[in-house]
């Protein structure tokens, strides 16, 4: 085996190093991003931009991510995640430099689109890398590590941004771009140029179709099946991605996107309404992140051991209560306490949802496309919410929060019937696949029941 081939296979064979690199890069990228995010609405308002205009600029970030995420998922699955990670960080850094030189709201929005495109591609590539290389029984903890990097950025970024932003907001833009450059260094130095994932210890979700002759190029995290070089570019059949399990997850993604869009545009404005200073607004982000960090590892363990469907359903209900409560509370300590409860719920929900997504989109090379579809849905609803919530907040500060909470409540009600036949744990998949294998029919006969990512579905 030549040196290039050995390098190409290094990624999947050393998931610990991969996870460390991705977590470090994620921390740096989110550190820079959240040095900007909490203060940007106030910075724009100080430039006499209306609440609706603030919503447009904040939504522009997510519009950029919307344009990049599905393509990034496909590219990461077909060509390896290293290049997508680097391109994403470069685009984000260029957007930060553009904000530093911005001359008006039009350029602000354009640079936020560029930032969002880069950040969206980076996040999808990182999550796809975990889904494609980590065994299902450890994916909850692996995804939790990535989200821990994100939340560390959320915790530290606003503190650094708040300190600098009190005096020179343009320095915050430059610092965020520098963080993106630093984030690219571990990716550039420690990850192989291409990653062509071999099979990882995994649980098969269905008897795989007969493979096309040729060297396997990518293994799916939960199926262990492979595709030939000639089939990489072919999209998996729609039924492999748009089945009940994935549809439920898309509802979860949409709900999370709506809530995120409301927070992006309205959180700082709500805190300012209640008399919070710029420093205190940044501190609310840090205090939100701390309980998440405390519960991140136990939450990953729960996602690997407990029924992921129930974890997602319960945490969605908790979100509906917390989001609806914020605009009715005028005590900042009480709001912070409630946000800590929400942080614990999200610490459980994120790795559970990502693990279930890896399971449900694992057939053929659907992992990258599944991640891209999930992220695109989440981002599309974030764009909508960020755009609409500025005007809604101007009409009544309670409206955007209450409407997002209703969406969460509806999502929680729809998940049980959608996921009735979806396996919630790795152990359930093993039992169902074993049962399917014992009753398998010879090739060419009509199957009785299909047990792929939605076992037992007619």
Image: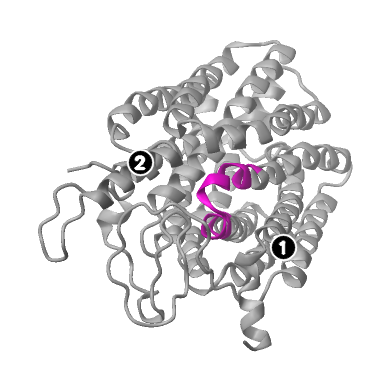
Is residue 86 magenta-colored? no
Q: Residue at x 70, y 10 (%)?
A: 331
**Mark 2 touching mark 1, by CB under 8 A?**
no
Q: Residue at (47%, 65%) from the top-left corner? A: 219
Q: Which quarter of the image is occupied by the C terminus?
A: top left
Residue underneath mark 1: 93
Q: Main secondary structure of the magenta part?
A: helix
Seen in the picture, residue 210 relative to 332 is either above or below; the reply is below
Q: State the separation of the CA atoms marked 2 and 1.
A: 47 Å
Find the magenta span and give its range: 127-144
Q: Where is residue 215 in the image (x, y as percent from the top left)?
A: 44, 81
Q: Which residue lies furthest to the bottom in this view?
A: 2
Residue 293 position in % (x across, y down):
72, 33
Find disc 2 in the rendering and name its residue: 431
| Crowding at mark 1 (Cα within 10 Å: few <14, some 14-19, many 20+) | many
Left or right? Give the position of 437 relative to 388. left
Residue placed at 41% from the left, 36% from the top? 424
Please name whichever residue, 131 or 161, is drawn nearer the observer in this view of the structure: 131
The image shows residue 387 at horizontal and vertical percentages of 50, 40
Quadrant of res 118? bottom right
């Amino acid at each position: 085996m030549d040196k290039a081939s050995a390098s190409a296979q290094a990624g999947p064979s050393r998931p610990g190093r991969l996870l460390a690199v991705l977590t470090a890069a994620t921390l740096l990228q989110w550190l820079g991003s959240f040095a900007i995010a909490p203060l940007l609405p106030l910075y724009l308002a100080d430039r006499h931009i209306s609440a609706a205009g603030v919503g447009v600029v904040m939504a522009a970030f997510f519009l950029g991510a919307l344009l990049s995420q599905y393509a990034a998922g496909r590219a990461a699955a077909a060509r390896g995640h290293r290049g997508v990670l680097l391109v994403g960080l470069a685009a984000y850094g260029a957007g930060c430099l553009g904000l530093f030189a911005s001359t008006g709201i039009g350029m602000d929005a354009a640079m936020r689109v560029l930032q969002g495109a880069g950040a969206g591609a980076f996040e999808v590539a990182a999550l796809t890398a975990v889904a494609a290389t980590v065994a299902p029984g450890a994916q909850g903890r692996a995804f939790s590590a990535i989200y821990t990097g994100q939340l560390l950025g959320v915790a530290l970024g606003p503190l650094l941004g708040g300190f600098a932003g009190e005096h020179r907001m343009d320095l915050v833009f430059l610092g965020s771009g520098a963080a993106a450059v630093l984030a690219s260094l571990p990716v550039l130095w420690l990850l192989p140029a291409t990653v062509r994932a071999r099979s990882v210890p995994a649980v098969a979700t269905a008897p795989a179709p007969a493979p096309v002759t040729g060297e396997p190029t990518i293994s799916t995290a939960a199926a262990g099946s492979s595709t030939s070089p000639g089939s990489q570019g072919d999209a998996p059949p729609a039924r492999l991605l748009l089945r009940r399990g994935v549809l439920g997850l898309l509802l979860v993604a949409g709900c999370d996107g709506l809530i995120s869009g409301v927070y992006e545009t309205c959180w700082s404005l709500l805190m300012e309404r209640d008399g919070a200073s710029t420093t205190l607004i940044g501190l609310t982000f840090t205090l939100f992140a701390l309980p998440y960090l405390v519960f991140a590892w136990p939450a990953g363990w729960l996602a690997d051991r407990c029924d992921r469907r129930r974890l997602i359903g319960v945490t969605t209900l908790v979100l509906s209560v917390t989001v609806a409560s914020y605009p009715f509370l005028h005590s900042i300590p009480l709001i912070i306490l409630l946000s800590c409860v929400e942080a614990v719920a999200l610490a459980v929900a994120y790795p559970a949802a990502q693990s279930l997504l890896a399971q449900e989109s694992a057939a053929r090379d659907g992992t990258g496309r599944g991640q891209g579809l999930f992220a695109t849905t989440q981002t599309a609803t974030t764009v909508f919410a960020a755009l609409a919530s500025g005007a809604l907040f101007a009409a009544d500060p309670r409206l955007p929060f209450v409407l997002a909470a209703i969406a969460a409540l509806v999502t929680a009600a729809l998940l049980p019937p959608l996921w009735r036949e979806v396996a919630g744990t790795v152990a359930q998949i093993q039992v169902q696949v074993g049962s399917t294998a014992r009753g398998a029919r010879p090739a060419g006969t009509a199957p009785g029941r299909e047990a792929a990512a939605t076992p037992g579905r007619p």
